[in-house]
């Protein structure tokens, strides 16, 4: 019995021990399986995040290159337009040119504007009347280009046409002198539609773009475009982080937290973002491709649910986990294949080559424009590993390439290199290689994914630029030496010029003093001459009355000669005195409202009609305008017409004199036309000079002092009258006057 009992106890104890061992083993298996599931979960999550990051980066790179090429194309267009003469001179032909250019780019631009060197709008299309002549020098980009004469891409601003936009301005030069600039206004919606709005990451990921100052040039969220990031409540906490990332101008992956303060309670979302800087003239933009962390969780949600089911039902968990994991792998592989096909298509259209280099194995997966860029087909490169690839690189560049790649892997940073490459047809080209390191934390899983493009043309340009730079530096050195010599000579010339200017000022002051002395002398002498002449004429009149009844023809002719000579002398003295008044500045005009025909012309015609009749000449007045009142000085205007009509009668022997008055809304024109002896073309430019007559000396046929027309010219200046003369020898002379109406 005791043996049986002992055996039973031992058997029970063995079963208990076996059961406990099973439980412990089962628990350990569950724990181990859970740990393995957790490790798998973390790996899947990391792969998903890596895949998301790759998608963000690729989308940002493509958009960045597209925008850079768009801006470069516009800048090239403006450079070409700025070289056209009608644009340089802002001549009338510029309007048609700007219209034609705009119509070819109407889906990409809002307007094109020509601005002069002081900031005034000269021409714009589409035409906005209120914009022409507006000064926009206060706008920061216009102020910059006026001061620096360099191309510039503006911040967001309100154009004079009345909408928010971005301007690309390019300087215009004529003969190396800055004459203004050409500006195109770029609409937000074109940039968004062409480069950004189609970027989708998952269900809620999107792309947006910041200017240098933090203004959102594009954002799919309503009312965000055109606003500063600090103005938006969602970015209140993340604004400075985002601005700091943009200011560094370095592409890379980042994380920030966005708070929606309009919701109650407030919610904070973790967001993955890839920022890609776009380097533009005098500024930069930053593309931010963003996706919230719940996009990753959304991808992982099915896996997590199955994970819970596996914990509950161990028996089914292995199969379910394997199935889900395999589905996930297949889905990821399919997604990768689809992305590779997309990248290949994009590469073929843009000339880019994509690669995925597994560092440990040396294997490389290729895509993109392989044939056009590298000269190899995809089949040619299928079995080419990293060692075979290096054989195609120029020997002088191999070490530097290997050094850059090793450094990127060790520092877990991005990879960049430029090197010479031999195509399949033995043609040598320059390549630019941009790569990023993936899975740096997973040992033996490091990959370098990158983009290669042909930069041979750029290298040729750089070589030419370097040669031009050396030539320019040599030329500047020579010109500097020459300029220093000329500066020394100029200093000597300036000193000599200062001495000459000093002597000229002394001579000018002496001449002005002499001129004043002359005028004062003439005024005094005129007074001294007129007094005795007046006495002679008075006593001659008394003698004429005394001999009136008994005077003979000879006596009568003598009295007439005395009167004519006295009147001639008095007229000469009057002219000298009037001229001295004008030149001494002592004459004070008295302006009043006058009728040119009634108050001036008709009284003078009546006065000279007897003189005209005595020479058998006609004296006519043709008034072709209504009576107009002008604000004039009566004395000087009367002297103008009296001198001109007197001269016309004096120098006309046959025919007559016509005074013709006409006009329009702004001016009256009066012409004194005679059929006299005329004036030679050589003498016409000197006709208004003092003491000047066409016939000089004692043999001249006509009397006169040469002062009358000089005074007429000065009287015209007092009354703001334009005077001109047209004449032909033996045909006649026409004096024209143009008077402004009030």
Image (cartoon, rainbow, N blue to C red):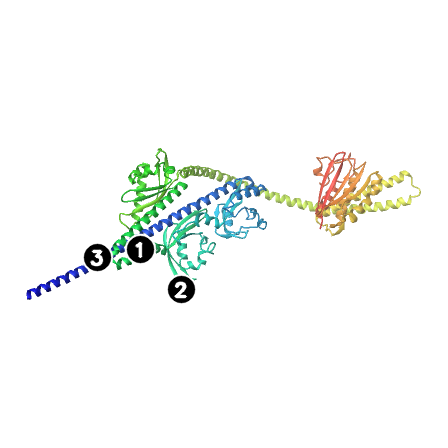
User: Would residue 272 appear left or right of 504 to someone viewing this image?
Assistant: left
Q: Residues within 10 Å of mark 2 (few under 14, many from 20)?
A: few
Asked where in the image residue 503 lies, by quadrant, the reply is: top right
* Residue furthest to the right: 550
Gap between marks 3 and 1, in whole Å?
20 Å
User: Would residue 12 appear left or right of 602 to someone viewing this image?
Assistant: left
Query: Where residue 691 sits: x, y (%)?
Result: 73, 40
Say which label, 2 or 1, has the lower sequence index: 2
Q: Which residue is mark 1?
A: 303
Q: Which circle marks residue 63 in the picture?
A: none
Q: Which residue is mark 3?
A: 29
Element type at mark 3: helix
Q: Which residue is mark 2?
A: 265
Q: For the residues carrying marks 2 and 1, which lies nearer the camera in this image? A: 1
Does the image show residue 178? no
Q: Residues within 10 Å of mark 3 (few under 14, many from 20)?
A: some
Q: Residues within 10 Å of mark 1 (few under 14, many from 20)?
A: some
Q: Nearer the viewer, residue 181 or 55?
A: 55
Q: Nearer the viewer, residue 49 or 336?
A: 336
Where the N terminus falls, by quadrant? bottom left
Q: Nearer the viewer, residue 499 or 266?
A: 266
């Amino acid at each position: 019995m005791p043996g049986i009992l002992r055996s039973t106890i031992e058997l029970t104890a063995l079963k208990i021990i076996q059961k406990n061992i099973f439980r412990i083993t089962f628990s350990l298996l569950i724990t181990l399986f859970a740990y393995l599931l957790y490790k798998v979960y973390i790996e899947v999550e990391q792969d998903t995040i890596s895949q998301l990051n790759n998608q963000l980066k690729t989308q940002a790179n493509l958009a960045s290159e597209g925008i850079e090429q768009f801006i470069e194309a516009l800048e090239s267009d403006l450079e070409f337009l700025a070289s056209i003469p009608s644009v340089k001179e802002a001549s009338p032909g510029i309007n048609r040119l700007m219209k034609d250019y705009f119509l070819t780019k109407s889906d990409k631009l809002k307007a094109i504007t020509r601005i002069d060197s002081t900031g005034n709008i000269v021409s714009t299309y589409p035409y906005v009347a209120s914009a022409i002549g507006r000064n926009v020098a206060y706008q920061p980009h216009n102020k910059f280009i006026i001061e620096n004469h360099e191309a510039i891409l503006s911040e967001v601003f309100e154009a004079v046409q009345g909408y928010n936009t971005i301007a690309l301005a390019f300087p215009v030069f004529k003969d190396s002198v800055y004459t203004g600039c050409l500006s195109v206004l770029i609409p937000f919606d074109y940039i968004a539609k062409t480069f950004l709005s189609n970027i989708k990451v998952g269900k809620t990921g999107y792309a947006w773009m910041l200017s240098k100052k933090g203004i959102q040039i594009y954002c799919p969220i309503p009312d965000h475009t055109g606003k500063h990031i600090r103005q938006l409540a969602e970015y209140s906490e993340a604004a400075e982080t985002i601005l700091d990332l943009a200011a560094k101008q370095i592409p890379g992956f980042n994380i920030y937290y966005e708070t929606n303060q309009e919701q109650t309670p407030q919610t904070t979302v973790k967001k993955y973002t890839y920022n890609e800087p776009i380097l533009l003239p005098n500024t930069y933009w930053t593309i931010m491709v963003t996706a919230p962390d719940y996009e990753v969780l959304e991808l992982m949600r099915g896996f997590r649910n199955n994970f819970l089911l596996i914990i509950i039902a161990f028996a089914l968990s292995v199969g379910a986990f394997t199935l889900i994991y395999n589905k996930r792998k297949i889905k990821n592989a399919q997604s990768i294949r689809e992305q590779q096909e997309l990248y290949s298509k994009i590469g073929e259209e843009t000339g880019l080559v994509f690669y995925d280099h597994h560092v440990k194995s040396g294997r490389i997966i290729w895509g993109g424009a392989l044939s056009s860029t590298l000269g190899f087909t995809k089949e040619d490169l299928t079995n080419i590993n990293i060692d075979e690839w290096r054989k195609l690189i120029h020997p002088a560049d191999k070490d530097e390439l290997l050094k850059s790649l090793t450094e990127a892997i060790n520092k877990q940073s991005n990879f960049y290199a430029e090197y010479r490459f031999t195509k399949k047809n033995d043609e040598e080209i320059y390549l630019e290689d941009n790569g990023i390191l993936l899975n740096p934390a997973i040992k033996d899983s490091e990959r370098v994914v990158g983009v290669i493009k042909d930069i041979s043309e750029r290298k040729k340009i750089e070589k030419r630029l370097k040669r031009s730079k050396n030539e320019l530096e040599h030329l500047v050195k020579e010109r500097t030496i020459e300029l220093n010599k000329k500066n020394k000579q100029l200093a000597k010339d300036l000193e000599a010029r200062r001495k000459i200017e000093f002597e000229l000022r002394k001579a000018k002051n002496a001449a002005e003093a002499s001129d004043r002395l002359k005028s004062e002398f003439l005024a005094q002498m005129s007074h001294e001459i007129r007094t005795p002449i007046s006495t002679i004429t008075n006593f001659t009149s008394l003698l004429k009355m005394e001999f009136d009844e008994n005077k003979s023809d000879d006596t009568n002719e003598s009295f007439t000669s005395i009167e004519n000579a006295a009147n001639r002398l008095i007229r000469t003295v009057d002219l000298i005195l009037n001229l001295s008044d004008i030149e001494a500045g002592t004459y004070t005009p008295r302006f009043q409202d006058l009728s040119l025909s009634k108050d001036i012309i008709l009284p003078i015609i009546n006065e000279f009609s007897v003189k005209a009749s005595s020479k058998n000449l006609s004296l006519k007045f043709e008034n072709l305008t209504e009576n107009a009142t002008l604000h004039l000085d009566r004395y000087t205007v009367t002297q103008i017409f009296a001198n001109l009509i007197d001269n016309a009668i004096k120098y006309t022997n046959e025919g007559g004199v016509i005074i013709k008055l006409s006009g329009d809304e702004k001016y009256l024109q009066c012409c004194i036309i005679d059929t006299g002896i005329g004036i030679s073309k050589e003498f016409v430019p000197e006709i208004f000079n003092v003491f000047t007559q066409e016939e000089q000396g004692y043999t001249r046929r006509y009397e006169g002092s040469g002062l009358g027309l000089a005074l007429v010219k000065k009287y015209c200046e007092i009354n703001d009258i334009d005077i001109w003369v047209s004449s032909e020898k033996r045909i006649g002379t026409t004096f024209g006057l143009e008077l402004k109406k009030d």
